[in-house]
Every structure is written in C-alpha cells, then in structure tokens.
Image (spheres, helix red, strand yellow):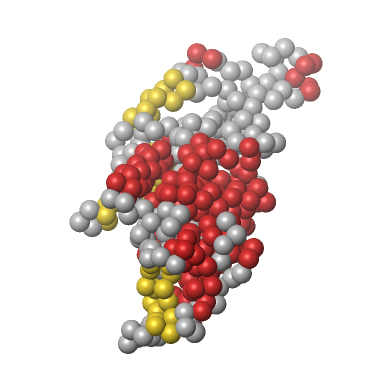
C-alpha cells in the first residue's frame, strides 16, 4: 500500500519533517548529479576476527565508484561499527590499505578512506540521509510526509527530532545485532521512519489513510491506518524471519530487521516523549472506521457550529424585555418548542448513504462535531 494522505489535521507547521525531507532530497540529488557510478576498482571488506587470526573468513568484494565510495564512507557497515565498539581496527585498516584492480590484481594501496574512531559510531546517523535509488528515496520520503507531520504536531519540534534519530539508531542496532557480520553498508531513512509509524499507530488509532494499491494498475482506496501499518509490519516480519531461516540476514538487500527494530522503538518511546504534552491539539480529528471506507472516502474539515444555541433563532433577551411581560413586549421572540425539529433526524448524503445525526444544543466553546465523527471524510449534508 502506497500512502497518499491521512485524515489527521495538525495545528502546527511541521518544520522538522519538512527539513528532513529537504535534506534527504538534496543529498540524493547531490549523489545523483555529481557522483559517477562507473566502478574504477574494488575493495575487499573482510571479517575482522578472520583478519586478526590470519585465517579465511567472510569477505565482500565491493565495487568502488564515486557513488559507492560515498555510500561506503557515510553508510553504516555493521562489521566496522562492531569492530570499533570492540576496540579492533583490522577490517577498517584493510579497507583503507588494499584494493583490487579491474583486471583482478590485488594491490596494497589506494583503498577507500573511512571515518576513524568515534566518527564511525556516527555513521548510523549519516546513513539516514543516504539512499540508493529513486524508488528508495521517494518511498521513504512519502511515508515521512504522510505520517511524520502529525507525530511532530503531538510531540513538538525538538522532541520529534530526537525521537526520529533515536529510532534510527535503534533500527541500526537491531540490524547490526542480527547481522553483526554484515559486510554491506546499511543506508536509508527507513528505520527512523518505521519509528514514526509505530508512534502514529498509538497516537491515531482511528485515523484513515488514502492509499494506492498496485495490482495491475494503481487502485485508490481509503483504509484504517492500523490496517495499513499492520500489513506493512507483517510484511517485514515475514521477510525478516525468512532471511533468518535462509541464513541471509547479513547478506545485504533490504534491512527488514532495521524496520522492525525502528517500529518497536516508536511503540516504546512515544509515550515518554509525550510527557507534558498529553492533550491533543484542538483541531485533531479521529474518524470512525465504520464509514466511509473504500473509494468513497472524503478528506474535508467539518464545518464549525455557529455560535448560537439554536439554528436561526437568537435567544438573547434585550434589557427592555424585563420591563413588560413576554406576550406584551414585541422585542421578545416566543419560541414554540413543539415546532422545533426533533433531536434525532435522518439525513441523506450525495452518495446515497444515510446516517443518524444527534441534534443537541451547544455553546460557542464546543466544536460542531466532536472527535470521532466521520464527517471529516464526507460532504456536509445539503
């Protein structure tokens, strides 16, 4: 399911979400337009323990171009991160000091310059802004655009930024733990965005999402947010378990367990990051799931209730009304309650569906329809 937009309205401008989208887009355009992709040589990424004991071990022949060298330097290579945490540098030094020419000759010079020491532990952060292709970057930024603004609206700008980066680090830790010997750099913002999805699921469990479902062609539908996010989570679980069963969790490809780890981080961290901000914004809308779903969902803000108690009738009594009985004062309007509309009326919508609406008096401080109404997705009745 490809999300297009959701039903949640926010009361603030998502500065952090927009900044993250812009930075990711600019980094991708820089890589695409300035870095060449043609490989000039290769480097061998070898297992640290095997290099220290001078015995054969897992290796990865990595083609080096300007594009892939940038990815290797700023991406998070699990073997390099775990070696740095263990105080070992054999793999790091081997990558920097050795290369393989295009004709297959092993040369002990001209490797790839990597970060040293503590800077290696920052590569999970820099990896959040690097992507490997158009579908990768567009998919991640689309998920961040649809779901990130509402989570930022609830947490606040500074808290959301910390939440985003912590989720990304937890996602990287999950990937490294299950593929600690992985010799392929991990890149992309998917882990941090997975944390945003976990927070969104708990904050807006009644939200609706407009999605495109690619079957033969793209089919637009409106589905509950838990259904869409749950389907995404199960898809990652099945693929992650399949990788472990096939013993391919550390062989590259999609970092399924980074997605799962980031999602779990979002579920666990969302409430601590909401301390002091429990109250939802005034404009928040949480539609019901029962209607509408499918193709007929509408994304409209419900109109506000007029600031008087009854439609078309002003009950304010002027001061001179107290000087004469109501039946003798022409400025007092007598209301016959028997002629009022019933409290419960049935109205029809343009789509032919009917619903029951409860007509109750309100005051100016209350919205016309409380959170939970489906009217955010429907035209107001004629």
Q: Is residue 169 left or right of residue 294?
A: right
Kindly indicate the quadrant of the structure image that contains residue 134: bottom left
Residue sitting farthest toward the bottom: 103
Residue 125 coordinates in the image, percent (x, y)? 57, 60
Q: Is residue 294 left or right of residue 192?
A: left
Residue 5 coordinates in the image, percent (x, y)? 43, 51
Q: Residue sitting at 41 percent across and 38 percent down?
A: 226
- Between 315 and 215, the one nearer to me in the picture: 215
Residue 174 appearing in the image: yes
Up/down of 211 relative to 76, above or below:
above
Residue 41 appearing in the image: no
Q: Is residue 239 left or right of residue 368?
A: left
Residue 213 coordinates in the image, percent (x, y)? 29, 51
Kindly indicate the quadrant of the structure image that contains residue 155: top right
- Between 181 and 379, the one nearer to me in the picture: 181
- Between 133 and 221, the one nearer to me in the picture: 133
Q: Residue sitting at 45 percent across and 54 percent down?
A: 180
Q: Residue sitting at 63 percent across and 21 percent down?
A: 333
């Amino acid at each position: 399911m490809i999300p297009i937009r959701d039903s949640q309205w926010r009361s603030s401008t998502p500065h952090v979400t927009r900044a993250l989208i812009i930075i990711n887009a600019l980094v991708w355009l820089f890589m695409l337009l300035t870095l060449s992709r043609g490989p000039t040589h290769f480097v061998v990424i070898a297992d640290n323990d095997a290099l220290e004991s001078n015995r054969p071990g897992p290796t990865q022949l990595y083609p080096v171009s300007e594009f892939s060298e940038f990815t290797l330097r700023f991406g998070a290579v699990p073997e390099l991160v775990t070696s740095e945490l263990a105080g070992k540098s054999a793999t790091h030094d081997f990558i920097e000091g050795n290369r393989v020419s295009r004709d297959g000759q092993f040369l002990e010079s001209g490797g790839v310059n990597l970060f040293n020491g503590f800077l290696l532990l920052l590569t999970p952060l820099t990896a959040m802004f690097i992507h490997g292709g158009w579908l990768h970057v567009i998919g991640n930024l689309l998920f961040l655009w649809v779901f990130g603004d509402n989570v930022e609206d609830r947490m606040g700008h500074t808290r959301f930024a910390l939440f985003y980066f912590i989720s990304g680090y937890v996602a990287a830790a999950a990937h490294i733990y299950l593929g600690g010997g992985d010799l392929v750099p991990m890149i992309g913002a998917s882990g941090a965005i997975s944390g945003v999805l976990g927070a969104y699921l708990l904050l807006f469990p009644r939200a609706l999402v407009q999605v495109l479902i690619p079957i033969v062609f793209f089919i637009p539908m409106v589905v509950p947010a838990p259904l869409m996010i749950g389907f995404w989570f199960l898809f990652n679980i099945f693929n992650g378990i399949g990788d472990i069963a096939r013993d391919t969790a550390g062989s590259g490809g999609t970092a399924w367990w980074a997605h799962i780890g980031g999602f779990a981080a979002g579920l666990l961290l969302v409430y601590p990051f909401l301390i002091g901000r429990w109250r939802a914004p005034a404009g928040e809308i949480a539609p019901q799931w029962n209607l509408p779903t499918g193709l007929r969902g509408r994304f409209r803000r419900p109109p506000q209730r007029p600031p008087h108690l009854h439609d078309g009738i002003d009950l304010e009594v002027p001061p001179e009304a107290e000087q004469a009985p109501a039946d003798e004062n022409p400025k007092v309007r007598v209301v016959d309650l028997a002629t009022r509309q019933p409290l419960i009326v049935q109205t029809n919508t343009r789509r032919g569906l009917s619903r029951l609406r409860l007509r109750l008096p309100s005051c100016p401080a209350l919205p016309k329809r409380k959170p939970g109404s489906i009217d955010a997705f429907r035209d107001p009745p004629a």
